Image (cartoon, rainbow, N blue to C red):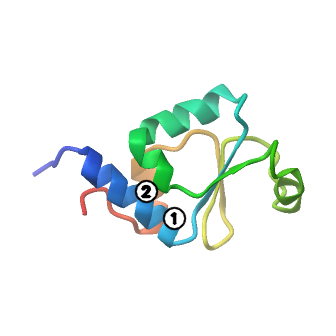
Amino acid sequence: VKTTTTAGNINNFAKCLSATGVELYVLNTCPHCAKQKEMFGSAVQYLKIIECSKNYELCVQKEIEAVPTWILPNGEKLIGVQDFELLSRKTGCKLNQ
């Protein structure tokens, strides 16, 4: 049975990503970053998002070479727009909680 992804599910998914230490590095001028954030809708507020123009030193320290970049708790970097399925698989956060 395939369940639909509701706003509540996305909220829980985004909260889980943050709770597990997942970080999303972006630039406000980046169209791909905007697309990634739009995928989360209002749940974007629950993500740990680091804006590199305001946190330049941190982004250099984390060796962010392209945005959007997701950094997982194990240090793995996912560069580019990621779908929910991959983020779920990589983090253990479930979409339909």
Give how far across and how far down residue 73 sits, in percent.
61, 72
| 13 up-or-down from 25: above or below | below
Relative to 54, residue 35 above or below: above
Relative horizontal placement of residue 18, taking residue 89 as reference (left or right) = right
Report the residue at 34% width, 50% height from top: 10
Q: CA distance from mark 2 to mark 1?
A: 6 Å
Check contact, mark 2 vs mark 1: CB within 8 A: yes
Q: For the C terminus, give its image quadrant.
A: bottom left
The location of residue 82, given as percent across then percent down, is 52, 44
Q: Secondary structure at mark 2?
A: helix
Q: Is residue 15 left or right of residue 52?
A: left
Say which residue appears at 68% left-offset and 69% top-offset: 75
Q: Give left or right: position of 90 versus 77.
A: left
- Front residue of this view, candidates 81 and 11: 11
Neighbour class for label 2 at 10 Å: few (<14), some, many (≥20)?
Answer: many
At which x and y percent is residue 96? Answer: 24, 58
Q: Nearer the viewer, residue 84 or 48?
A: 48
> What crowding class fits label 1: few (fewer than 14 Cα within 10 Å), some (14-19), or many (20 or more)?
some
Query: x%, y% of residue 25?
Result: 69, 49
**Three-letter residue code for mark 2:** Ala
The residue that mark 1 highlights is: 18
Question: Which quarter of the picture shows residue 39?
Answer: top left
**Mark 1 is on which residue type?**
Ser
For the point 62% across and 31% down, the residue is 32
* Residue drawn at the location 41% of the way across and 48% of the way down: 43
Q: Residue 14, which numbered label?
A: 2
Q: In the structure shown, which secondary structural element does the residue marked by tag 1 occupy?
A: helix
